[in-house]
Image (tube, rainbow, N blue to C red):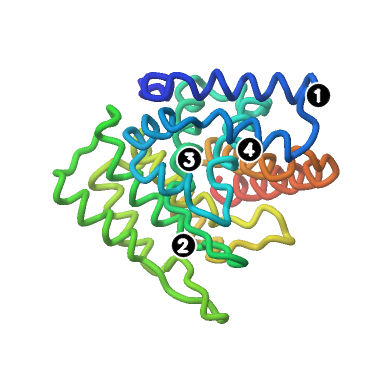
Amino acid sequence: MVPRLEAHLPELLPFARELVDDYHRETITTWEAWHERISMWWTPERLDLADRVIPGWRLMAEHPFGSNLVHVTSVVAALLMLPEYAQLTPNQQRLVEWIVIFHDVAKRRKLGLRDHIHTFRSAAITGGALSALGFPVTGEDNAVLRWSRMTYDATTTNAKGEPIPDNAALPRITAGIRELFGWDTSTGLIVRGVLHHQTITNVEDDPQAAELTPDEIRRYISPELLPILRVFYLADCDAWVLFDLDNRSQWRQSTLNVFAAVARLIA
């Protein structure tokens, strides 16, 4: 049984359901009102609780230039709206909820620049945090710490000189996941979901900075991870365009098409 998010952050999912109700009733109709509603809900006490559960949450929430806190909360709400989420098993639903909560925990944008390296760094934090939340970890603490540091530091630069995840490190990173967390275990699936939450280009106009090759997709995206990752990508896309219905529809269809192709690739 996958540990429940509600056991650690009991108010978050009920609040996300309130947001969904407000969205469907059109009580909230603009991004500005949505942003304000979420920002007001996150009191210092709620931030402190989340930071005890998710190491680095407060740093993520208070970092300028990114609206990280609003975005992650929006992804939770967008997740609950998806028919694909409703079609998952209860354990799969819990897995994708944890992926949503952890996926941007290391994001530190700079003014005018995107943070491409937060994917691996968020995965590193996730791997180090899950055992305290009741997830099984087979490796000793020192081994997990070494893996986390190696994953956190796995960066390179692109042609523009921008830091990006170093996919050349994926064999070492994934070997550590297999050894410490298990490949398709609940722990392994969450860590891998966070690790790969920006490695597949699902919207053509917004290519990923460190995209997996077809061979890497076959190697790293398992049939067990695929439905969970697909639902995450759908929710993450929706969260950016909740009040832009044309783009929301286009991005959703593009994501569905891309993941249908991924399913054929790994079949």
In the image, residue 83 lies at what x, y percent?
68, 25
Q: Which residue is mark 4?
A: 235
Closer to the chain start, of discs 3 and 4, is: 3
Q: Tell me the amino acid under the disc marked 1.
A: Glu
The label nearer to you, 1 versus 3, is 1
Closer to the chain start, of discs 1 and 3, is: 1
Q: Which residue is mark 3?
A: 225
**At numbered mark 4, what does the secondary structure look like: helix, strand or loop?**
helix
- Depth order, front residue of 89/33: 33
Is residue 69 left or right of 139 when viewed as pictured? right
C-alpha gap between disc 3 and disc 4: 16 Å
- One can see residue 213 in this view: no
Closer to the chain start, of discs 4 and 2, is: 2
Q: Tell me the amino acid under the disc marked 4.
A: Ala
Label 3 environment density (alpha carbons within 10 Å; few <14, some 14–19, many ≥20) = many
C-alpha gap between disc 2 and disc 3: 21 Å
The label nearer to you, 1 versus 4, is 1
C-alpha gap between disc 1 and disc 4: 19 Å
Q: Are marks 3 and 4 in contact (CB under 8 Å)?
A: no
C-alpha gap between disc 4 and disc 2: 21 Å
Q: Residue at (46%, 62%) from the top-left corner?
A: 117
C-alpha gap between disc 1 and disc 3: 34 Å
Label 2 environment density (alpha carbons within 10 Å; few <14, some 14–19, many ≥20) = many
* Mark drawn on residue 117: 2
* Mark drawn on residue 26: 1
